[in-house]
Amino acid sequence: MFGKILIANRGEIALRVLSACKELGVRTVAVYSEADRNSLHVRFADEAVCIGPPRSSESYLNIPQVISAAEITNVDAIHPGYGFLSENANFAEVCEASQITFIGPRPDMIRLMGEKDKARQAMADAGMPVIPGSEGVVPDEDAARKAAKEIGFPLMIKAAEGGGGRGMRVVNSAGELIAAFQTARNEAQQAFGCADVYFERLIERPRHIEYQVMGDLFGDVIHFGERECSIQRRHQKVLEESPSPALDAKTRKEVGDRVVAALKKLKYSSAGTVEFLRDSTGKLYFIEMNARIQVEHPVTEMVTGVDLVKSQIRVAAGEKLKDVVGPFEFRGHAIECRINAEDPETFAPSAGRITAFRVPGGPGVRVDTGAYSDAVIPPYYDSLVAKLITHGRDRSEAVMRMRGALEGFVVEGIKTTIPLHRRILTDEEFLAGNFDTHFLDRSAALAAK
């Protein structure tokens, strides 16, 4: 096992990794920007190093600064959490060159999965069903017209190195194509430094379902079931649950087995998430893979009893997956609500000082957060304040526990999405499990009540 790990992140995920390290008896180093000097991950780590000004580009995304902090504190490994440098293949390579273990997949796998068009082809070659689309990147307007004619309308334009809904456009007709193509390319260039886009056939009213996986350094891979992530706003997940109300036991096993077989073929290691769209007939198509731990990993931890972050650290240290995880079974149902510092009606950011903060508790209730009363939510980073997770014997009990937990969650001084979550948890369509990724678009009244 590692002697000391640097946590190259902030907020609740930094605290989550720190907690796992403490349970493993591993010392921790926190890094922080000047805006996060008073953050809890700085307070509770064994050591802490300031790596720059508030802006991410000058601190959390500054590879030389992060590596320098790792070297002066003499760490054995770096855990990147999610976001920031977690899917940066160059950073993983620099860690290797510096003889520091990167707690994540190999650099070549990060690079492959980061280029969505190539990931799509690699998974298709490994036996996964993919949405019909262009053969790789669509380079120019002539190629766009040709690809669109072959695929048909409606179609989706996607950034090849994208995520989070940026660089994505729906095209319903040939007349919309070129303007949408240019807009998507420009947005992709600004967001990711790469203008490459590719096309996919648009699946209308899809469900977004993802499988949590883990691989070790010996070629073994297992999955931990699926999560339902269809409650989204502008392609950003708002609420997640496991298991999916849309999958039966047979489908769950069949898709899980195919995921494991594909990732064994690719020799995938560490934590990851394989994401699918489910069409109206029930067929699942691979869309992308996130080569890191996910924001919503606690949902899976609650239904499996497996500590995914500890497991991720242990396999990175060279332990075999079968020894790390051991036998487990799926138990009950779990739901996660992302509590963001946003206006629940307009979704405008709401940075500022928290004047009162009270988290709920009780059986089956978990809160992952880096917030506290008098903490400041800075305007420079993701707006996530906390993740509220409930677990029940079935979906109904998990929903009822979530309703009670939301009522008991107090955040004052800033606006949060708690009122929106309360409304979602009483919506008839949601309660029936009959929803898709356009749920919030169609249920505009949820954001207006």
Image: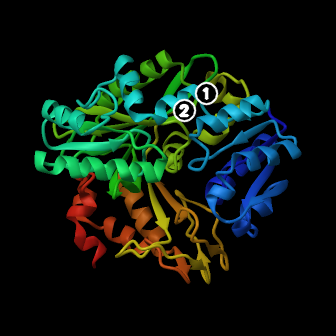
Visual colour scheme = rainbow
Q: Position of residue 244 (x, y in %)?
A: 34, 44
Height in image: 171 above or below 428? above
- The amino acid beneath tag 2 is Ile
Which sits in the foreground, 291 or 380?
380
Residue 429 image-quadrant placement: bottom left
Q: Residues within 10 Å of mark 2 (few under 14, many from 20)?
A: many
- The amino acid beneath tag 1 is Arg
**Residue 393 visible within the image:** no
Which secondary structure lies at badge 2? helix
Tag 1 and tag 2, C-beta contact below 8 Å? yes
Residue 53 image-quadrant placement: bottom right
Q: Position of residue 333 (x, y in %)?
A: 42, 48
Height in image: 368 above or below 195? below
Q: Quadrant of the C terminus?
A: bottom left
In whole angstroms, how far apart are the C-alphas of marks 1 and 2?
6 Å
Q: Looking at the rendered structure, which numbered label has been put on residue 106? A: 1
Residue labelled with disc 2: 110
Q: Quadrant of the N terminus?
A: top right
Q: Residues within 10 Å of mark 1 (few under 14, many from 20)?
A: many
